Amino acid sequence: MTNTEEVVKEQTLNFLSGKSSEDPFSLFAKLRSIGSVVSVPNPMDSNKQAWMITDMDEAMNVLKDNKRFTVDPKGLEDNNLREDLANNLDSSTPDTFFTGNSMLFVDGVDHKRLRKLVSRAFTPKYMEELRPRVQQIADELLDQVIEEGAMDIVKDYAYPLPINVISEMLGVPTSDRKDLQTWSSAIAKGLGWGRQDPSIAYSLNSFGNYTKQLVEEKRKNPGNDLISQLIIIEEEGDRLSESELISMITLLIFAGHETTSNLIATGTMMLLDHPKQLEHLKSDLGLVPTAVEELLRFNGPSTSVGPRFAKEDIIINNQKINKGDMLLVLVKSANRDEQKFYQPDELNVMREIDRHLAFGQGIHMCLGAPLARIEGDIAFTTMLRRIPNIELNVKRDELDWDIALSSQSLNSLPVTF
Ligand code: HEM
């Protein structure tokens, strides 16, 4: 291996641990030139190898191959981050999506069973019925700031929109939504390559206890919401345990807003960075759904999907991967693959995209993608229609980015209009 390759790998690990720059794309391009399967030290055990998957074909191969790769390292891996974290929690803490058996961290029949219980609630057809309510929420948020001529896109729009939508679907009271957001944000930001902030344990604990209490209240006073429907399934007996119920609810809340907030805020920033594309979009708002796909490809919320683990010794692309090795599929890198996209580093709101990996791929592909697409469509359309003269209200290099292992987000995005 050359010195340059060593430097590129080290810089990538620094980025993933949250220590460096906001723009990983030139690094990812260099990683792709090293190979589609790149070895790095395992952050939890430096004697072991981990692997970064950098291009579209290999990313697809790994994510679709649930015979040879798994999201669940139990029995394969000595250093399991989720188990380490669970051991640090107070033993009375209920399971959450991260520490318990949520669909994100199980495969096979359990995954199928858990996903099937909620998949009907997230079909594109059902999501379309939510459109009027999502529109109303977007309009109400803009009504609150429109007279002022200024707002923070993150706090005033990108965060409240998706948390309110998913909370209404689940039946989470309005007064509790701020706490959910605070815990989710601490969990999303607290994990870097080999880094685990202590605030994660606190947030998981609070999140789990809150959800358990909410379930108890809804057992007594059921409503017309998804949590009440899941409680009926749990009480019927053999399809959902109480621990799985709490894990499922915390997953839906967490996954249901963190990433979508990020799409709206980072997406707005990407448009401000590309004024011609922004003008183009403003002149034809019918292009917004296409632009949302391009924003997801160009700089979507997820840097990588959750780690995968090899179930057996495997050779891919001449690299020998040992049973138990961890693989990090860098979807942001795959989405800039020069073999698959014409001028991948250009943002083009008219680009027709066959496939991007912002929602993952295979059996764990994002359950909430139809909802995220509707929220993205309405958020951008409403913003560009009602406040078209939007401008950044801080210097570009003063933006406050948070970089974690699986995502990259803005802490605030002040604008005038
Ligand atoms: C722009 C917004 C979103 C992005 C970029 C996104 C991204 C992702 C990705 C990449 C995965 C795959 C993780 C993996 O393979 O390890 C995933 C899974 C998941 N997402 Fe999303 N997501 C978004 C919005 C949502 C929404 C609104 C929900 C609603 C509840 C949601 C619920 C889920 C769930 C439940 C899973 C786990 C699916 C499984 O394991 O079978 N997501 N998401």
Image (cartoon, grey):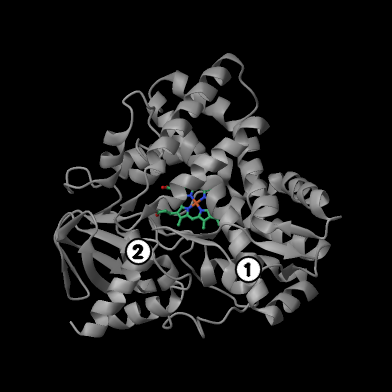
In the image, which disc is placed on residue 403? none
**Can you tell me whether the CB of the residue at mark 2 lies under 8 Å from the nearest atom of ligand 1?**
yes
Question: Which residue is found at the position 64% from the left and 72% from the top?
Answer: 395
Answer with left or right where residue 296 lies relative to residue 62.
right
Question: Which residue is found at the position 34% from the left and 60% from the top?
Answer: 64
Pinpoint residue 81: horizontal percent, then vertical percent: 27, 46
Using the rendered view, name the quadrant where residue 276 is placed.
Answer: bottom right
Secondary structure under the numbered disc 1 in the rendered image = helix
Q: Nearer the viewer, residue 43 or 300?
A: 43
Instruction: Please give the count of numbered marks on the rendered protein.
Output: 2
Local crowd at mark 2 within 10 Å, few (<14), some, or many (≥20)? many
Q: Quadrant of the N terminus?
A: bottom left
Q: Quadrant of the C terminus?
A: bottom right
CB-based contact (under 8 Å), mark 1 and mark 2:
no
| Residue 318 in sight | yes
| Residue 36 in sight | no
Answer with left or right where residue 393 lies relative to residue 30.
right
Q: Nearer the viewer, residue 280 or 4?
A: 4
Identified by mark 1, the residue type is: Met
Answer with left or right where residue 252 lies relative to residue 265.
left
Mark 1 — residue? 269
Question: Which residue is found at the position 74% from the left and 78% from the top?
Answer: 280
Ranked by sequence position, the earlier of labels 1 and 2 is 1
Pinpoint residue 272: horizontal percent, then vertical percent: 67, 73
The alpha-carbon separation of the residues under discs 1 and 2 comes to 25 Å
Pinpoint residue 73: horizontal percent, then vertical percent: 23, 47
Secondary structure under the numbered disc 2 in the rendered image = strand
Local crowd at mark 1 within 10 Å, few (<14), some, or many (≥20)? some
Mark 2 — residue? 329
Q: Is residue 343 above or below residue 127?
A: below
Q: Is residue 168 above or below residue 159?
A: above
Using the rendered view, name the quadrant where residue 201 is placed.
Answer: top left
